[in-house]
Image (cartoon, rainbow, N blue to C red):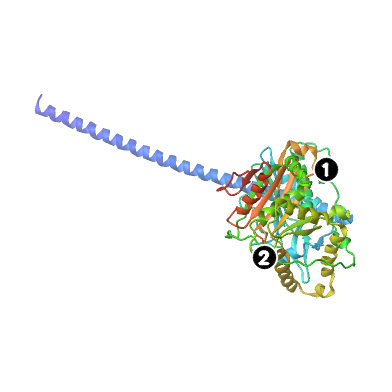
Amino acid sequence: MSKDKETVVDMQALSDGCSDKKIAKNLAKDEKKQLKNSKKQEKLQIKQNKKAEKQKINELLKQRKLEEKQLRKTQEQTLRELEKRGKLQSWFRLDNAASIYPSASVKDWNFVYRLSVTLKDKVNKEVLQSAVDDIMPRFPTFNVRLCHGFFWNYFERNFARLNVKEEQDFPCRPFDLDDSESFLIRVLYRDYTISLEVFHGISDGRGALMFFNSLLARYFQRLGENISDMKGCLSYLDVPSDQEVEDSFFTYYTQKKYKRPKERPAYKIKGNMLASSIVNTIEAEMSVSEIKEVAKKYDASLSAFLAAAIGYAVYKRQTGNKPTRISIPIDLRTRFESSTLRNFSSYINVEVDGDNLKFEDVLNIFKRELSTIDKEFLQANINANVSLQKNAFVKVLPLFIKNIVMKLGFNYMGENYQTLALSNLGRVDAPREFEKYIDSYTVNLGKSKHNAKSIGIISYNDKLTMCISSKLASSQTERDIISELTSHGINVKVYSNRRDLYAAR
């Protein structure tokens, strides 16, 4: 090949090489441009999706606000109609027992207790919320907010919506009593549990149980159940009666004066205190028939036997000269034919004191003391409390002074005479359809202001639950009580919110 030909071939190859590079460069440039456009389109699509999602959320929120507004309007119309018919007040004085609870409160404590059910199926939040919406207008004394007057605290109707919430904290958290817009009850749920927490100023355990069972009945109805017998609960369609909202302390007050026995300060269970936000609870589940069988051997009632077992377990670790004293609330409704849903209970302090007492000795103390509760004893408590509230000098004291006086009285005269409170709500009366859905009930008295422990007892069918709430890190008292029960041959299944000790429900 000639030199000129070789030069032509080289130039052609070089030209072809440059052309390929140019093509490759253009292709890369186009690919980069397409990628850039693709990313731009992708970002634009994401932006549009976010905008659409935000718009959808805004529309849902707007719809929810409209629904809540309509619900409040409907509830207000219902309440107004009831008021026109003379069946509803727009505000309530605190009942005689309730008047002390706002005054005795401090920043991190007020008297809050809880009723719970363990269900056989998981809780449906939406259905539960609908059930709460349905029943709130039916219960005017629960559908309130706390207001502070010049002379007294009082309750005023609350037109807001009570929203159910998933449980995430320790039980029986205090309510913000300075927030005049908030409710004084809360409805909580968690997996298989529905709970009602109540500020004691609203109602006692028996009144709250009627509200709670009415809520459960409506919940089961909304799940499709036909409740044939409203035993132990009230229909959301009923009109509230005058008797339900009355202050029965004033209704049954008489001017007769009684002499009441003087008491001395009680022994207190000591230990390392937990943080103010923590309430440890241990639940002991037992068979009602099994306890009754053991109690029968001692010729005692179930209530007397359980109280004695608790009293004896605490007494065995008693130190110092102060007596162990168990405070037992007494429901006054059956004694005075009342159907109020507000507070209407009294109490008896049973003292366990003496040297080297055996269980039988302590049981005899409880049997004797509980048998002495008669109408005269209860009337004396009613008259003493109401006469103080009716005192002319007390009436004209400004609220801020009343608060100081009542707080001092509660601190130095109330729980100062107790070692612990033991509240037994007894057997739950409920519609038979509840058996399809409910496994057991629990009552948690929450944190006491001055006592280390509080105990709530309730039974449903053959299951009895004893819930011990504690402010102490130590669970020695709980162990002592459970050991005392098992020593009598009673089988005890234990649950707790203390993961370091026992299984949780």
Which residue extends farthest left?
2
User: Mark 1 or 2, which is nearer the eye?
Assistant: 2
Query: Is 85 or 299 nearer to us in this picture?
Result: 299
> Which percent across, then down, holds residue 189?
66, 46
| Residue at the image position 28 percent from the left and 36 percent from the top | 22
> Which percent across, then down, holds residue 232?
81, 45
Helix, strand, or loop for circle 2?
loop
Side of 427 relative to 494 (left or right): right
Numbered mark located on residue 231 in the image:
1
Corner quadrant of residue 39: top left
* Position of the N terminus by quadrant: top left
Residue neighbourhood size for the residue with mark 1, other residues' Cα within 10 Å, grouped as few (<14), some (14–19), many (≥20):
some
Above-or-below relation of 371 to 404: above
Residue neighbourhood size for the residue with mark 2, other residues' Cα within 10 Å, grouped as few (<14), some (14–19), many (≥20):
few
Q: Identify residue type, mark 2.
A: Asn
Residue position for label 2:
321
Mark nearer the N terminus (1 vs 2): 1
> Which percent across, then down, holds residue 167?
63, 49
- The CA distance from mark 1 to mark 2 is 48 Å
Above-or-below relation of 146 to 135: below
Above-or-below relation of 149 to 280: below
